[in-house]
Image (cartoon, grey):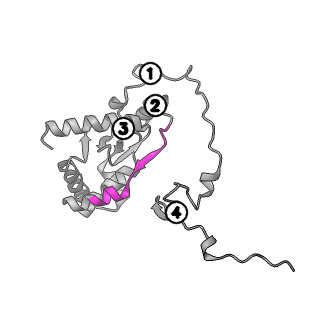
Amino acid sequence: MEQLPSVTIADVETKTVDVVPCGLGLRFYVDVASGEILNPTEQMLEKPAALTKRDLRDAPYVGLDTPWPNDARNEEELWQAVQTFDWWADRLVYDADNILDLLDVGLSDKAVRLFKHLARALSARNIWYGSVAELSKALYTPLRNIERALSDLERHRLIERKHQGRYWPMKISLHPWYAWRGDLQARSHALQQWVFRTAKTGG
């Protein structure tokens, strides 16, 4: 039987490790000196899919065949307007911790819960379509509490609500910093416009 060489403590390489939480209960252990992720997940080890060119010859002309994204009146119109050129139209970005921090600025727990629901259910960009009744049913909350929570969110400049008449759903725009679905380059412009509008109204 072969004798294995003994290992002294001096021979063991030591590393300074930092723990990085990444949502969904995942934690990555990162070597501070090299930046190496010490516990890569299966998804990270997979080879990323190669980007392919998109055939836009039959794509609709935004503004002609479809409305402009800001003028879309329902989820279908908005999706048609953004999906041609937005490669990441399905990608939702929102930070639950930032939304939870809104409790510290005086928002009620019902308003924060409603805001989180809207953030997770965006149609595209920072837009949600629906009715107060739909929100009441989804959150198991009385209509009057939903209305109060929406008013609270409007007062804190976290949403902009637009009633589109009898035949179209209500349109709610969320603050782009908290939630966005799609290309993040478009988010930067939307965030800039939101800040300008808030500054003009004294928010």
Comes first in the chain, label 2 or label 1: 1
Q: Secondary structure at mark 1?
A: loop
Mark 1 crowd level (few <14, some 14–19, many ≥20, 10 Å Cα): few
Label 3 to label 4: alpha-carbon separation? 30 Å
Label 2 to label 3: alpha-carbon separation? 18 Å
Identify residue for label 2: 80
Identify residue for label 1: 65
Determine the residue positioned at 32% across, 45% down.
Answer: 177
Mark 2 crowd level (few <14, some 14–19, many ≥20, 10 Å Cα): many
Viewer-side label of 4, 2: 4
Magenta extent: 88-101
Q: Position of residue 74 (x, y in %)?
A: 38, 36
Q: Secondary structure at mark 4?
A: strand
Q: Was residue 137 drawn as part of the magenta stretch in this picture?
A: no
Determine the residue positioned at 31% across, 56% down.
Answer: 99
Q: Amino acid at mark 3?
A: Arg
Label 1 to label 4: alpha-carbon separation? 49 Å
- Between 169 and 172, which is closer to the camera in this rendering? 172
* Residue 13 shows up from this direction: yes
Comes first in the chain, label 3 or label 1: 1
Q: Which mark is residue 187?
A: 3
Comes first in the chain, label 4 or label 2: 4
Q: Position of residue 21 (x, y in %)?
A: 45, 61
For residue 53, which quarter of the picture? top right
Q: Tags 3 and 4 in contact by the CB under 8 Å rule?
A: no
Label 2 to label 1: alpha-carbon separation? 9 Å
